Amino acid sequence: MSPSFFEIIQLSNGDYALRRVDDDGAPLVRISFSEEAKDMMDDRQMQVAKAMIAAGIDAAGDSAQDLDWDSNDSFSDSDTDAEWYDAPHSPTLH
């Protein structure tokens, strides 16, 4: 399976979206700021949208570590010495 690359774009309605580079379908994530929020950000909406998406990816990675697997060969969240549990997160956005 080839890796997926993602991009953050600004939609025609002013929202920001995360989508796969090679897919023109519906975005994976959409962020919409109110007029009040836009005024407070002083034209930094794209930077804030990037930070929000990065935080979401990081949180999703953290929640994946909290899974309690049923298989005898898998680890539960109590196995803190497992290699995969201690591995640092490295989500990459392009």
Image (cartoon, rainbow, N blue to C red):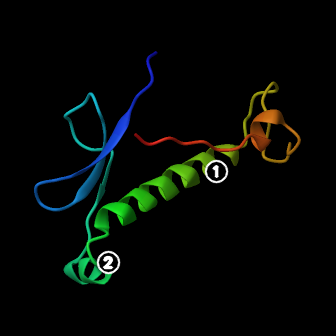
Q: Nearer the viewer, residue 80 or 48?
A: 48
Question: Quadrant where the C terminus lies?
Answer: top left
Q: Is residue 5 above or below residue 28?
A: above
Is residue 2 positioned above or below 7 on the image?
above
The outermost residue toward the top is 1
Q: Position of residue 41 (x, y in %)?
A: 32, 77
Quadrant assignment, res 87: top right
At which x and y percent is residue 65? 69, 45
Say what amino acid the circle numbered 1 marks: Asp
- Residue at horizontal 60 percent and vertical 42 percent from the top: 90
Identity, as a three-letter code, of the amino acid under mark 2: Met
- Residue picked out by circle 1: 62
Q: Residue furthest left?
A: 12
Toward which corner of the image does residue 67 lie, by quadrant?
top right
Q: Position of residue 82 (x, y in %)?
A: 84, 37
Name the quadrant containing residue 30. Answer: bottom left
Report x, y in % for residue 3. Answer: 45, 24
- Rounded to the nearest angstrom, the CA distance separating label 1 from label 2 is 28 Å
Residue annotated with mark 2: 41
Circles 1 and 2 in contact, beta carbons < 8 Å: no
Q: Dot 1, crowdedness within 10 Å: few (<14), some or many (≥20)?
A: few
Q: Residue furthest front?
A: 43
Q: Residues within 10 Å of mark 2 (few under 14, many from 20)?
A: some
Q: In the image, what residue occupies the spot 54% across and 42% down?
A: 91
Q: Secondary structure at mark 1?
A: helix
| Residue 2 appears left or right of 59 | left
